[in-house]
């Protein structure tokens, strides 16, 4: 095994940061969920998330690294995850290839006493499935365990309309391209509105990531998006500061 | 030959080399001249970096991961597909004309036989980054 891959898979090789997702109702944000963001070992090229996952995909080790990320995330945040919805990113290829992934999730959640209903699995699609039937069979298993599904980068690549209607995620995370451009461009707003309409018809909810200014927030909330995430609201932070999120929690919110 | 001067803007270099000692020496040497330097020890790591970060110049060892020159040429192909403006210097212990021709056909800007003194590599880097031929 190469040394970088070994470093990533070693105990402590995955560093986890967290970024909240807020629900904005009548202009007031309250904590809706927390997204776990994995990084590789500090001091290596994989400390950058984009390099980490590009490397992992090129090594064909998505399953091993996704499992390591799940373990690292839940072991560092189980106290919060017992009370709050927690979003974990997983490659679509892991769902497809790892027939025992649901069993793994169940065992890890059981060990840390985290309700599976608090997990949202955010599926990152980077390549076409080689075995769609196997992907959907495994996705059904994940859902039947009580885990909710989010689809990342909606609007780009393989997160296209066909996959949206076949996966029917509970959450549609619009790619930040549309968020970045929707202030100035009618056609970006039209694309967001079409995703909102589709999500509404399929009983899902839309999340806007990449909110970097008050203008961004005003624009997406005016379009009808309630779930938002971005540096303007809160930067990714280490687990030690997760407690700060608690003051944002609205009375009666599901988290 | 012109003496090495720091690049007017901070150039970003990637060194692809599987020998830790050579990798460390190249990193330290070029970093000392003010270059921003990343290193990769294997093909997939280099590809992940090239996909996500723009490099002005890549120094690639052809005999990466002990598999003759194949992976080195693979990196050249990859760079040409993903970042056409990135210049590539190939280091190789293979002195055969065939390998050099293959590297040049794939767009290598310079081919340097190993072992080469660091100042020699640095001169070529500086010339290429200033827009001169190697």
Image (cartoon, rainbow, N blue to C red):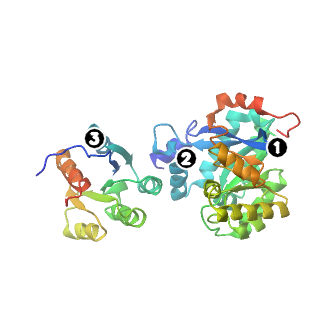
Asked whether B46 or B128 is in front, the reply is B128
Question: Whole-percent x and y of residue B84?
Answer: 37, 64
Rendered position, A239 above or below A174 = above
Question: Whole-percent x and y of residue B103?
Answer: 28, 66
Secondary structure beneath dot 3 equals helix
Q: Which mark is residue A49?
A: 2
Image point 67% across, 34% down: which residue?
A: A76
Image point 21% across, 48% down: which residue?
A: B122
Residue under mark 3: which chain is it in?
Answer: B
The quadrant in which residue A168 appears is: bottom right
Residue at the disc numbered 3: B25
Per the model, the C-alpha gap separating discs 3 and 2 is 27 Å
Per the model, the C-alpha gap separating discs 1 and 3 is 57 Å
- Residue count near mark 1 (Cα–Cα under 10 Å), binned few <14, some 14–19, many ≥20: few
Residue at the disc numbered 1: A25
Residue at the farthest right position = A252
């Amino acid at each position: 095994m190469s040394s970088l891959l070994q470093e990533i898979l070693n105990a402590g090789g995955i560093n986890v940061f967290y970024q909240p997702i807020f629900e904005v109702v009548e202009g007031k944000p309250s904590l809706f969920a927390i997204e776990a963001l994995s990084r590789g070992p500090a001091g290596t090229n994989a400390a950058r998330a984009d390099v980490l996952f590009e490397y992992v995909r090129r090594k064909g080790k998505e399953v091993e690294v996704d499992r390591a990320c799940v373990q690292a995330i839940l072991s560092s945040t189980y106290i919060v995850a017992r009370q709050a919805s927690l979003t974990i990113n997983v490659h679509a290829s892991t769902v497809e290839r790892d027939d025992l992934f649901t069993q793994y999730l169940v065992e890890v959640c059981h060990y840390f006493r985290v309700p599976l209903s608090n997990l949202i699995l955010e599926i990152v699609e980077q390549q076409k499935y080689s075995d769609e039937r196997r992907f959907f069979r495994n996705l059904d298993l994940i859902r039947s365990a009580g885990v909710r599904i989010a689809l990342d980068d909606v609007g780009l690549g393989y997160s296209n309309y066909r996959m949206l209607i076949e996966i029917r995620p509970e959450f549609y995370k619009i790619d930040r391209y549309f968020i970045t451009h929707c202030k100035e461009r009618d056609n970006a707003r039209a694309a967001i509105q079409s995703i909102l309409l589709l999500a509404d018809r399929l009983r899902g909810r839309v999340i806007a990531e990449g909110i970097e200014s008050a203008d961004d927030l005003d624009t997406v909330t005016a379009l009808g998006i309630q779930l938002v995430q971005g540096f303007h609201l809160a930067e990714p932070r280490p687990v030690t500061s997760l407690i700060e999120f608690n003051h944002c929690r609205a009375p009666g919110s599901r988290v | 030959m012109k003496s090495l001067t720091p690049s007017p803007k901070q150039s970003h270099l990637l060194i692809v080399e599987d020998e830790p000692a050579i990798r460390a020496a190249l990193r330290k040497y070029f970093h000392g001249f003010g270059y921003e330097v990343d290193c990769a020890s294997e093909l997939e790591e280099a590809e992940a970096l090239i996909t996500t970060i723009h490099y002005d110049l890549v120094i690639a060892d052809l005999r990466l991961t002990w598999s003759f020159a194949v992976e080195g040429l693979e990196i050249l192909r990859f760079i040409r597909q993903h970042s056409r403006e990135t210049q590539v210097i190939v280091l190789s212990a293979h002195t055969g004309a065939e390998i050099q021709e293959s590297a040049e056909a794939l767009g290598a800007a310079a081919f340097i036989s190993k072992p080469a003194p660091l100042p020699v590599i640095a001169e070529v880097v500086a010339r290429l980054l200033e827009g001169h031929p190697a």
